[in-house]
Amino acid sequence: QSGVSRQLFDRWATDPKNGVLIAGYAVEHTLAKEIMSQPKEVVTMEGRRQPLNCLVDYVSFSAHVDFVQNRDFITSVNPRNIILVHGAKEEMGRLKGAMMMHYNKLPENKRPTIAMPPNEVEVKLIFTRRRSAKVMGKLAEAPATAGDDGDGTVEEGKDRVVVEPRLGDDVRGILVTQQNSSKIVAPEDLSTYTPLRVGSVSSRLHVPFVGKIETLRMFLNEMFRGIDELNDTSMTDEDNDVEGEGIVTFSMHGGQVKVVAGKTKGVATVEWDCSSVGDVIADSVVALIMHAQSSAASIKLTSRPCSHRSKKLKEEGGEETDPKVTTEEYLRALHQALVDQFLSVEAIYEANKGTFEIKIDAINGNDEKEGEDDGALICTATAEFEDGLDSMAKITVESEDEKLASNVRACLQNVAAASAAIPID
């Protein structure tokens, strides 16, 4: 008759999409009683007449009902939560107890929660929301396959049929939610089915570099594997071309990370496509470029070699030493790694071959093995370079104890992996 409900009625009564539901008894000479007779016009609170186009319906609700009527009503509604309010405490308690006895006959997962909270006590209800999304575009197109025999092979002459997606199949795409509707699309279909676009971010960093390209090449090849190098001498500036190599571009990680040297004097440019892997590689490349200008190796490469030691050795009748790592030094490194791991290791060096005998005590002395030193476990490992360090090393491990042999083999493999360049797949 008045208040917010009357204001909303005056605003919504002219639209046939709206409706008014009158529950219970309507007093005579009120607007509720008047519109139940479906008049063509009604008078607003401001006193003007307007057409009544909305739907008007009436539902009979008794002011007082008994348990049977309440139970029938609740059963027809089938709610997940029932809250009893606005009644005498004793009577509501009896109603709650009777309803709990009634619903105890149902399985536990189908029983509603029944609460009878006192005044000013909060009741928290948990509602489960089931979300669904439409798979659109290429993801919705099931791959066309021919009828197979269960082994995934396709026979010639058979028609290709479309296999419907099955429950549990994995779907990989981008989930987009717009106006309470969700859809899953492939990245290449994002611009077709959504207003979004797929973009990429490329970064470029200019790093000061005053060393030689030869130095940079050496450091990059020692750190990374699979580097593609491109020389461009057509666009070289004579003032900047100090070494005569032109513009040199080093590409890593499938071309996603590039280092350009020689284009600008005193500057190396690092370019990469931003990604989790690309950012890590670019950071390591920048640190490598900075380190290449201050390390002892770079000073050695960018300056003339010192001949004082060679002259001194010649004067003393000695022989000049090769600055490169010799085969014997590499074999001694393997020996030191085995000593650090197994303590008791004896080594015999013969030209490009090293033989290592590892000896450890047997566990608890229970596994008595036929051999030396009262049941001690012995493992023999050999490492041989047929053509020096330029060839691959042939490593053999022999022992009666397979676990000891496996540990020695893993130790030698770790030393070999640590001395090799880092691969980038």
Image: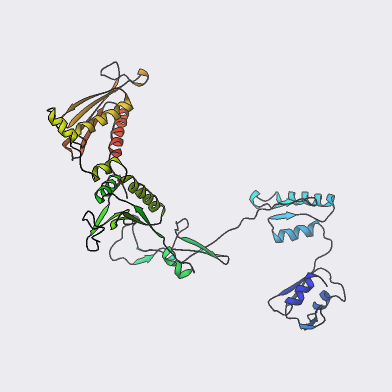
Q: Is residue 65 left or right of residue 422?
A: right
Image spot of residue 335 (x, y percent): 26, 28
Seen from the viewer's position, the closer of residues 57 and 329 is 329
Q: Is 19 situated above or below 289? A: below
Image spot of residue 344 (x, y percent): 29, 22
The image quadrant where one finds the N terminus is bottom right
Seen from the viewer's position, the closer of residues 379 and 417 is 417
User: What residue is rendered at 26% in x and 31% in y?
Assistant: 334
Report whether residue 6 is seen: yes
Q: Is 362 situated above or below 297? A: above
Residue at the right extreme of this rendering? 28
Instruction: Please give the count of numbered marks on the rendered protein.
Output: 0
Report whether residue 384 is seen: no
Query: Residue 128 falls in which quadrant of the image?
Result: bottom right
User: What residue is rendered at 28% in x and 64% in y?
Assistant: 156
Q: Is residue 69 left or right of residue 77?
A: right
Q: How is the image coloured?
A: rainbow
Image spot of residue 81 (x, y percent): 70, 55
Query: Residue 65 falls in which quadrant of the image?
Result: bottom right
Image spot of residue 249 (x, y percent): 28, 56
